[in-house]
Image (spheres, rainbow, N blue to C red):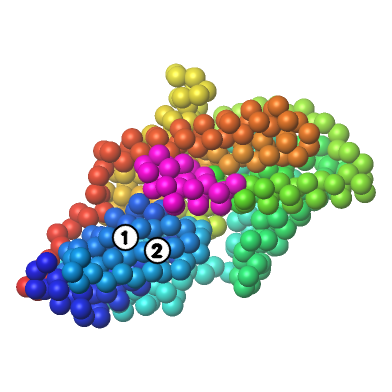
């Protein structure tokens, strides 16, 4: 290790920057591979040439320096949802360090600003976003205007339950089950009051923002790329969240059935293509709010949802249903890579909404729900389809990533000793 590297490892600023960036990046929701890549690049930019890092959803281990004088740090962390504004701000800080615009002290000051001033939006806007998401995803899932109206109403109710709970301490694990109870019960109530809408589809559309499709996809991708600890943890986390949702839906359905009787079957008619495109655009706007993205990124996120929908339809027409999801995720990954290269930041702002519109979690939700209601064979079939869908998305993103290796480190790191 060079002398400047040794001084950085023994000093405080460089180590403090790396450690605080790791914690902030984990809290912002970077996937393990992306966070590891950024930390290694950032560490080298501030003079730490020898670094080893292992990121999991609950633990981060970092070793700095060569073996004779190596120092090891361990951070206890918690799984976190994606915060796209924080991701963008952290990318800007890291890129500035790489280009020599900021030194370690300047980067620490900017990092402190990210930690102290997270993007917050008024709760009425967030509650409305849940309603918009429910209405927007309805045509994508095959529902009509009645289901869209019902899903918007149920989504607002779900948002009214979720937003305060998410801001309170120690309520994170129970937010999804509580939201699912409210969604299932209120969807049945609307059907009882005479709105001829399918309660199951309304419930699913209102809960799409809680489905762990992205977490499951990341987990499967990490397993495929031999990030085994992180992959197992993310996959297990997704399955637990699915079970929590199904528990809530089962409770809400049980109460509604006992009070109002079983819901009648509703025949669904496939929505027109134009309605699905409008729904995808509206979903992009809703995701901009629920994922804490910047308003100026709404165009990118709407483009991602429309691209995912169009690529999925085109893939199914050209290659069949099994290959459609792979084609769609490949298209989203390639365009997302171009976006990341152009903006010199993480492509998550494009990838996350694109993956969410493919709704890999919805099949998993249906599979466990079918098992809960005694539909064992169809539930098992849908469960296998869920993992096949998640793997298709994961491989599509992995293949697209080959075209844009190391797109984050586009600046030239300056020698901190110069």
Look at the numbered disc 2 and give the secondary structure of its residue: strand
Residue drawn at x 60%, y 62% is: 126
**Badge 1 is on which residue?**
53
Pick the residue in front: 16 or 120: 16
Number of marks drawn: 2
Quarter of the image where one finds residue 257: top right
Task: Count residues near mark 1 (Cα–Cα under 10 Å), then give few for <14, some for 14-19, many for 20+.
Answer: some
The quadrant of the image that shows the C terminus is bottom left
Quarter of the image where one finds residue 263: top right
SS assignment for the magenta stretch, majority:
helix
Q: Which mark is residue 26?
A: none
Say if the magenta span includes residue 414: no
Say if the magenta span includes residue 238: yes
Residue 270's spot in the image, x, y percent? Answer: 66, 27
Q: In this image, 66 relative to 401: left or right?
A: left
Q: In this image, 142 relative to 402: left or right?
A: right
Residue drawn at x 64%, y 28% is: 381
Q: Is residue 352 above or below residue 268?
A: below
**Badge 2 is on which residue?**
60
Task: Count residues near mark 2 (Cα–Cα under 10 Å), then give few for <14, some for 14-19, many for 20+.
Answer: many
Q: CA distance from mark 1 to mark 2?
A: 7 Å
Residue 310 visible in the displayed image = no
Pick the residue in front: 340 or 392: 392
Q: Is residue 109 above or below residue 363?
A: below
Look at the numbered disc 1 and give the secondary structure of its residue: strand
Q: Residue furthest left?
A: 418
Residue 76's spot in the image, x, y percent? Answer: 46, 68
Residue bounds of the magenta highlight? 214-239
The quadrant of the image that shows the N terminus is bottom left
């Amino acid at each position: 290790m060079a002398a400047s590297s040794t001084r950085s490892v023994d000093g405080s600023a460089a180590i403090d920057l790396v450690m605080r960036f790791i914690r902030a990046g984990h809290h912002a929701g970077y996937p393990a591979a992306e966070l590891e890549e950024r930390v290694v690049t950032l560490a080298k930019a501030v003079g730490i040439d020898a670094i080893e890092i292992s990121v999991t959803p609950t633990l981060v281990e970092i070793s700095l320096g060569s073996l004779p004088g190596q120092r090891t740090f361990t951070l206890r962390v918690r799984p976190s949802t994606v915060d796209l504004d924080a991701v963008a701000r952290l990318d800007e800080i890291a890129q500035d360090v790489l280009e020599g615009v900021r030194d370690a002290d300047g980067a620490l000051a900017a990092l402190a600003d990210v930690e102290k001033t997270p993007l917050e939006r008024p709760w009425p806007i967030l509650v409305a976003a849940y309603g918009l998401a429910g209405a927007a995803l309805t045509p994508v899932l095959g529902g009509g205007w009645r289901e869209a109206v019902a899903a918007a109403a149920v989504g607002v109710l779900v948002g009214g339950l979720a937003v305060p709970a998410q801001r309170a301490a120690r309520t994170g694990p129970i937010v999804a089950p509580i939201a699912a109870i409210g969604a299932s019960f209120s969807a049945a109530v609307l059907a009882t009051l005479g709105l001829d809408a399918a309660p199951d589809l309304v419930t699913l559309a209102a809960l799409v923002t809680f489905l762990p499709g992205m977490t499951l996809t990341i987990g499967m991708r990490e397993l495929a790329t031999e990030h085994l600890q992180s992959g197992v943890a993310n996959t297990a986390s997704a399955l637990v969240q699915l079970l929590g949702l199904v528990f809530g839906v089962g409770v809400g359905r049980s109460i509604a059935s006992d009070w109002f009787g079983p819901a009648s079957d509703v025949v669904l008619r496939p929505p027109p293509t134009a309605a699905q495109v409008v729904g995808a655009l509206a979903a992009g706007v809703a995701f901009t709010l629920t994922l804490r993205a910047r308003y100026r990124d709404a165009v990118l996120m709407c483009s991602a949802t429309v691209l995912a929908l169009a690529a999925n339809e085109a893939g199914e027409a050209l290659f069949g249903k099994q290959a459609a999801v792979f084609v769609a995720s490949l298209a989203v990954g390639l365009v997302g890579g171009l976006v990341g290269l152009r903006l010199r930041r993480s492509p998550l702002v494009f990838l996350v909404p694109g993956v969410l519109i493919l709704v890999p979690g919805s099949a998993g939700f249906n599979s466990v729900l079918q098992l809960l209601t005694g539909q064992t064979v169809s539930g098992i079939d849908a469960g296998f389809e869920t993992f096949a869908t998640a793997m298709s998305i994961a491989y599509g993103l992995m293949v697209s990533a080959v075209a844009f290796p190391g797109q984050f480190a586009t600046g030239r790191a300056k020698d901190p000793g110069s």
